[in-house]
Amino acid sequence: MAPSERSSDSTPSSSSATRLLSIGAALALTVVEYFLEVRGLHLVPQEEYGVLSYGSAEPATGPPLMVLVVAAFLVVAGALVWRKQKWPWLFVGAVVMTIGSGVQLPLESGAITNAFELTLLVSIMATKAFQDRNDHSRDLSPAR
């Protein structure tokens, strides 16, 4: 079904308000991240397995706030998609990424984090393909 043929339950004003709220939240989180993580950051060269990268000169005190907020939103969105569309994979991918990033594994390489990120990306792409194939995009609209 073409996008122009889809029926929309949301009014233009609620769509605009949602868009503005989303943009405002993203800008607010960006400003918070700048003041908490980026301002005053001193980078030093680091070499791991023969690859040069740059990292903070000071040890990390935990995951960045932005990562936690985005992970929380992804878990909530995944739960909504699971409940309304009977598709658990966005939720599973978000939970695997969150737990995998938060748990310190006794491995020399930090590459395992990339596997968790890949799991999340695959779950997002699979969810999008599922929604496109089954035209579930409107199933998440609030009931009126």
Image (cartoon, rainbow, N blue to C red):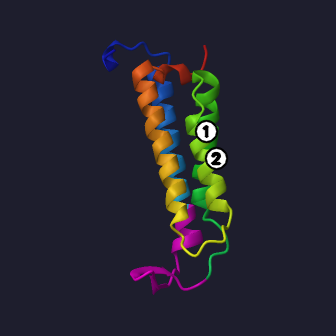
Q: On residue 44, which mark appears?
A: none
- In the rendered image, which quarter is residue 90 located in? top right
Residue at image mark 1 = 91
User: Does 92 lie within the magenta span?
Assistant: no
Name which residue type carries label 2: Val
The residue drawn where x is 40% and y is 22% is 133
The residue drawn where x is 67% and y is 67% is 104
User: Does 47 lie within the magenta span?
Assistant: yes
Residue at image mark 2 = 95
Q: Residue furthest front?
A: 107
For disc 2, the neighbor class at 10 Å (few under 14, some 14 to 19, many from 20) is many
Q: State how far apart marks 2 and 1 are (Cα).
A: 6 Å
Q: Is residue 113 left or right of residue 62?
A: left
Expressed as whole percent of the image width and height from the top left, the position of residue 59 reads 62, 81
Whether pointer 2 and pointer 1 mark residues with C-beta atoms closer than 8 Å, the reply is yes
Name which residue type carries label 1: Phe
